[in-house]
Image (cartoon, rainbow, N blue to C red):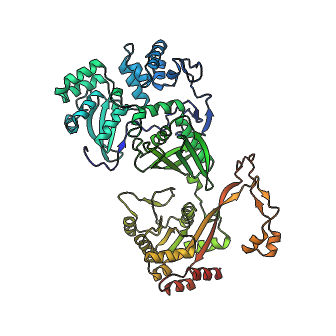
Amino acid sequence: MTLFGSTKSKERTSRTDDPRRTDDNVFAIVETDERTAPAGNGVITVEPNGDGASQDPVDSTTHGRGTSTPTVAAARDRVVQSLLRSGTVSKAVVRDAELHWQRQGQTQTLWRFLAAQKTVSAEAVYAEAARIYAFRRIELDDEKVVDAEFSRRVVDALTKDQQERLLTLRLLPMKAEIDSNRGSIRYVFATRDPMRPETLRLIHEMQLDHYEICYAPEAEILPILESLFPKQNEFLRRIEEDGTDAFDLGTTIEQGESKLVDEEKLDAEINRSGLINLFEAALVEAVRQNVSDIHIFPNPQRNTEIHFRIDGQLQLWHLHDKVHPEAVLAVVKDRCGNVDRFDREIAQDGFIQRKIDGALIRFRVSVLPIATANREVKAESIVIRVLDDRKIFTDLSAIGLLPEARKRFKKAISQPHGMVIMTGPTGSGKSTTLVAALREVLNPTVNALTIEDPVEYIISGVRQIKLGNRLNMEQALRSILRHDPDIVMVGEMRDRITAELAIKLANTGHLTFSTLHTNDAPSAVARLYKMGIEPFLIAYAINLIVAQRLLRTLCPECKALESDPDVVLMRELGFSEREIEETTLYIPQYDDACPNCKGVGYKGRQAISEAMYFSRTLRNMIVDADEKIDEDALRTTAIKEG
């Protein structure tokens, strides 16, 4: 069943996006000004908090392995702790409720069990839970708040079974409103307990694009539900008298894991394990260790591995075996923008922003569903790209090009028109070099535009165009000609149309930068020819092709002298006998005690490049090509010309 619109993307806003919310269980993210996550100013440090239990009003001693007193669960329950601190409930009431809760098998969270006790105000408990989990409070006393027509449309579209579940859950469809931030329709629901898995399951069945679940007291919800269901008033009264709880409607987590993960159980795991602060600590460490990507995924043992990609190599940073992988992934998705935590079957892209060590750092998040040994378990892999604008090179000298290559590069980008192409595999620094080249030629007299998918680094003085579902590369390239550009940077020439338009830009008086995935510079010419670009267009549009790789550099602190260099290999690489005698070679030491590389043996990376400048001879060779481009001949000629 589909209600109101398409089902292409499902988005949920049931909590306010609060990047400063933390949990003090395992780690504490501490800033110089206040005890919060890294959203404010100041230097961030990570401090261990003992055994993971915070200092709460309730004693949290344990007796024996795996057995707890009636106060341990209370000490881990954020809602119960808040109720104790505010004086809403007493310690005696909590201890008594926890004893009964344990005897009955702990089938639900302690705070919800507490709400069912006659000695406690249930509405006070639900209100506090909604406040802690940041659900919006809706006042239903105002008649304008609820759109009766919308509510009836929702009710009429439901099956009889769904209507009874909606009544049992006390779930009120309120209205459809315009979300000013997204420019789309948001469907608003109210319930006394927004976190129940059954509530989420029912709304998922409605297949709404974008919705919000809010909190309202049951006393305000029931009269409106009775007016919507006049024939079901007896059913509503029976629910109220029997005290039927939504947990009676669903399956256990083990029975329903393949269909819908119990979000309430995940929240409990998140709260007691300090995963929020662990994730924030990972972001901080990634920035400080110069990490390019963070990989988070479940391993075959159902533990969660967090890997850092440092200098092109993946290294295990943390193995978390205390909670389900779904809890770890839920934390990451919860703290991302534009990611639906509850959809585990589609690819999603999101973003995170944090202020770390005084700098605004952006993170690009990619979420993909992956297979596991248990086909019923819906697992996911998350990769986070660290985008630190401080890493952008401001000039070509920082790239590491040899003097002759740098001279030719500067000559090519100083031309008023023509194309400069960077080639190399993914992760070889092509975009970084082009950004440095762009900065080299920027000045107030030129209009520089970039077309990127996605925009990774913000470049001051450049108008950066972001591609998306409604704007593709071809559309952007066709439109950019009417935007009076002087310099254009195109992300990648992936097909014939993109290549033709980029070549056209270069041939019509614009300096154009772009990239190709080829192994070396001559191969880029052959690749364009195979795409269908005419040889004369290739010959006269391109100024320079640069092929680039990144090599790890030895750690300067622990590198060791090579006592027995491979002379034969050095000769094959072109070393003369004199150079062999005068050259000092070093090897990695792999010293675990080295504070700089921590036993890796390498620290940092260096770009190595080959630059093929298009001379008159090379242009004539390309124009004269018949059925194919002779890459070997181009390479030989380019080497002869230096």
Residue 576 pos. (x, y %) = 78, 76
Quadrant of the frame with the N terminus: top left
From the viewer's perspective, tell me whether residue 340 is left or right of residue 279: left
Across and down, in percent, residue 425 comes to 55, 64
Q: In this view, does 203 lie to the left or right of 455?
A: left
**In which image quadrant can residue 197 be found?**
top left
Q: Which of the 4 image quarters holds residue 31?
A: top right
371 or 201: nearer the viewer: 371
Quadrant occupied by the C terminus: bottom right
State the image coordinates of residue 255 (x, y, percent, origin top left).
Answer: 40, 34
Residue depicted at 36% across the width and 57% down the height: 469
Taking 278 as reference, is 624 above or below it?
below
Count of labels shown?
Answer: 0
Residue at x 42%, y 25% (from the top left corner): 107
514 sits to left or right of 145: right
Residue 580 location in percent, x, y? Answer: 80, 71
Comparing 36 with 607, the one in front is 607
| Residue furthest left as drawn | 231
Q: Can you see residue 376?
A: yes
Residue 41 is at least partly visible in this image = no
Residue at 74%, 52% (x, y): give it. 590
